[in-house]
Image (cartoon, rainbow, N blue to C red):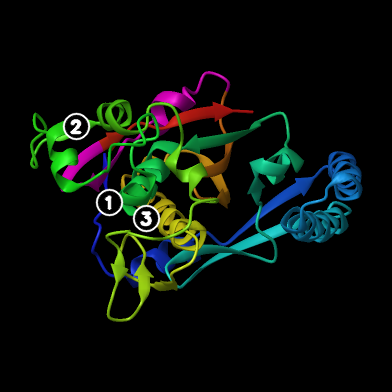
Amino acid sequence: MIDIKQYSPITKELNTALSRLGESRICLDGEIIREDIDRLEKMLENTFSKNDKINIKQLIRYTNRMLKKSTTFLDISWFMEDGLAKAYPLELKYYPEYCIDAINYITTSSSEKVVEINYSGVADLIAYEIMHRDIGDIDDENIEMTMSEIEKRLNDIGIISINDFNILKERFFKNYSPYKYSKMFKVNESPYIDLDKKKIKDYFGHKEFDIDRYYEVVDYSTKHAMALIFKGLTETKLLNNFNWKLVAINNDRIVLILNVDEDFNIEDRLSNSVVVRVFGRRFEVAPEIKVY
């Protein structure tokens, strides 16, 4: 179990965990990348949204950079910047809104497996903690998410015990993903607003952002959380007994390439839950593991 400390400082240990990895060499499938480029170019021709045009043009530039790397090996090295795990020279990015997932570009040998360790519940918890006053109750717009309303819904949940993530999900956001909503909601009444500075702080209190939309503050908070989870995985020594490479750390997942035998039980070996603090209580999120 990995316990995320909300107010812990950014330490050198994260950078150490990343720098020890060396380079991760991967191969990319140029044909799949070309298919995405063609699809994005058609989307660009057919969209009337100014924001979509900007985003799609950026993705076309990104996928073209990936295409150039498909003619040779891509050697990824890792470092920490501002509390986030960064990959050089290119990150394997994930934009589900445009059906772009650079993990799909990876080609592997017969002995390798691409493994996605998905912690979307962590991203949802952090996003809801930051945004709950503005989201309110989606199913009943007349209910404001005040502290009294929160305490009423969690009156049977103690502040010391570790509770199942699904309890909070069922009582507050059972029909939607707060993390996905962060890309469209504007900041108005978040408890993370610093009124004196007229800024909003991230979940961990490391950075300040302009009071505009939630995307930036939630994006940073969730990426920092995933970096901490990766550091936690390396500390549990779960990854010490086989060959592996880190290829992506996104907002809600960590992606590895494993070189293991066919009888190696990946799901059991890598299923390490994470504890996150929300509303003064601790909730445990089990990962969803996908093997490609």
Q: Is residue 13 visible?
A: yes
**Towards the viewer: 163 or 234:** 163
**Towards the viewer: 273 or 280:** 280
According to the image, label 2 marks what residue? 163
Q: Looking at numbered disc 3 in the image, what kind of residue is underneath it?
A: Leu
Callout 3: 10 Å neighbours few (<14), some, many (20+)? many
First in sequence: mark 1 vs mark 2: 1
Q: Which quadrant: the N terminus? A: top left
Marks 3 & 1, CB-CB < 8 Å contact: yes
How far is disc 3 from disc 1 in space, using C-alphas?
A: 7 Å
Marks 2 & 3, CB-CB < 8 Å contact: no
- Residue 188 position, x and y percent, is 38, 60
Q: Residue at the location (73% across, 57% down)?
A: 55
Along the horizontal axis of the image, is 67 left or right of 176? right
Q: Could you say whether the residue bearing mark 3 is in a helix, strand or loop?
A: helix
Q: Is residue 290 magenta?
A: no
How far is disc 1 from disc 2 in space, using C-alphas?
A: 14 Å
- Residue 161 position, x and y percent, is 10, 36
Question: Start and end of the magenta stretch?
Answer: 262-283
Q: Looking at numbered disc 1 in the image, what kind of residue is underneath it?
A: Ile
- Residue 94 position, x and y percent, is 64, 47
First in sequence: mark 3 vs mark 1: 1
Q: Identify the disc placed on residue 4.
A: 1
**Towards the viewer: 278 or 62:** 278
Q: Residue furthest bottom?
A: 197
According to the image, label 3 marks what residue? 228
